[in-house]
């Protein structure tokens, strides 16, 4: 389950899984697993495709279902979407 706390840890390391893995802070590693990290990576990638308007309607619908299944609530989902729109936003295509 993805929580806002896990997203904040992910954000602290800028999405850099190697930096997080090398951090060696047992408390942070107890709060977010490698699997959680990969899920967040994938969600950010998927939402970035949607944000950049390069995803099909079917793909968007599938991602929405997935987000609803793996995020713990509306606050987490909104925080994730905000991260994609601000922190992890890719430059617009020409």
Image: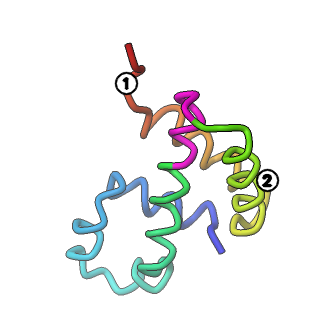
Give how far across and how far down residue 27 sits, in percent.
41, 83
Q: CA distance from mark 2 to mark 1?
A: 27 Å
Secondary structure beneath dot 1 equals: loop
| Whether label 2 touches label 1, CB < 8 Å | no
Which of these two is toward me, 51 or 88? 51
Q: Mark 1 or mark 2, which is nearer the start of the sequence?
A: 2
Residue visible at 41% across and 77% down in the picture: 28
Foreground label between 2 and 1: 1
Q: Main secondary structure of the magenta part?
A: helix
Q: Which mark is residue 91?
A: 1
In reply to whether residue 6 is colored magenta, the answer given is no
The image shows residue 41, relative to residue 79, as above or below, that is below
Give how far across and how far down residue 13 sits, in percent.
32, 58
Of the 4 image quadrants, the one containing the N terminus is bottom right
Magenta-drawn segment: 46-54
Q: Which residue is mark 2?
A: 74
Residue visible at 52% across and 42% down in the picture: 83
In this picture, residue 14 sits left or right of residue 63: left
Q: Which mark is residue 42?
A: none
Which of these two is toward me, 51 or 86? 51
């Amino acid at each position: 389950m993805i929580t806002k706390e896990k997203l904040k840890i992910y954000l602290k390391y800028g999405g850099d899984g190697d930096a997080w893995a090398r951090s060696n802070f047992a408390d942070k590693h107890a709060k977010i697993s490698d699997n959680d990290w990969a899920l967040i990576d994938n969600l950010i990638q998927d939402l970035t495709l949607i944000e950049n308007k390069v995803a099909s309607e079917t793909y968007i619908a599938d991602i929405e279902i997935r987000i609803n299944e793996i995020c713990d609530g509306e606050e987490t989902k909104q925080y994730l979407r905000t991260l994609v729109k601000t922190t992890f936003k890719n430059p617009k295509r020409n």
